[in-house]
Amino acid sequence: MDCCKRLLTELAAPQAERDAVLPQALWSSALVAYARCFGKGRRFGLTTEDVRGLELQGAVMKFHKWVIGERDKLTRHSAKPFEEAQVGAALSPPEQTDRRVEGVAIFYASRVLIDGIGVRQLGGLASELAKQIAERAQEQQDSVLADAQQLNIESLYRRPPLRTRPPAADDDAAGDAP
């Protein structure tokens, strides 16, 4: 959602003032972050049923599948790397009597498609899914709290505190996981 918000700000700037790399980076990050939530084998990940269950209008599933497909194109190696570039001959103007090839033009075909509508759609979809996840998280938090309140309070105080920082370089990386 944050990538989409920042990207909309960037797209609102005049084309001449925009950093050409930043919109691509933000859009790519948004696609990857969104799709990561649907990864297989994730115990608490999202599913297509979660998307289907949203009360949104329009071709939500079609857009969702498109976003996942765009992420896949960004993260997978192309079987044919030369598909991404086109080379053409730059010709002299057709009305010129001495017609000739004046040069070569190379067009890089970027797979990154960025427009305000798509960014708003992705941001809105992510926002609705985040609300859904927040509700689930609250239910889970309430369940954990109820379970924790049933435990012996003295044994809880004897337990080591949870680590809130990354391990230091001299800590055993495989050892003391929380």
Image (cartoon, rainbow, N blue to C red):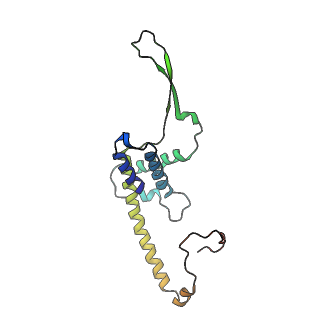
Q: How many marks?
A: 0
Residue pushed farthest top? 97
Q: In the rendering, at what x and y percent does residue 127 appear?
A: 38, 59
Q: In the rendering, at what x and y percent does residue 46 appear?
A: 47, 60
Q: Is residue 106 above or below residue 125?
A: above
Q: Looking at this view, is 94 or 36 the one in front?
A: 94
Quarter of the image for the N terminus: give it: bottom left
Q: Looking at this view, is 93 or 37 the one in front?
A: 93
Residue found at x 50% / y 21%: 103
Location of residue 170 by image quarter: bottom right
Q: Is residue 83 above or below residue 119?
A: above
Residue found at x 41% / y 12%: 96
Q: In the rendering, at what x and y percent does residue 4 appear?
A: 40, 53
Visible residue check, residue 176:
yes
Visible residue check, residue 53:
no
Q: Is residue 78 above or below residue 105?
A: below
Quarter of the image for the C terminus: give it: bottom right
Q: Is residue 91 above or below residue 34?
A: above
Residue pushed farthest front? 17
Residue found at x 46% / y 82%: 146
Residue found at x 58% / y 82%: 160
Location of residue 56 by image quarter: bottom left
Q: In the rendering, at what x and y percent does residue 153 appear?
A: 51, 89
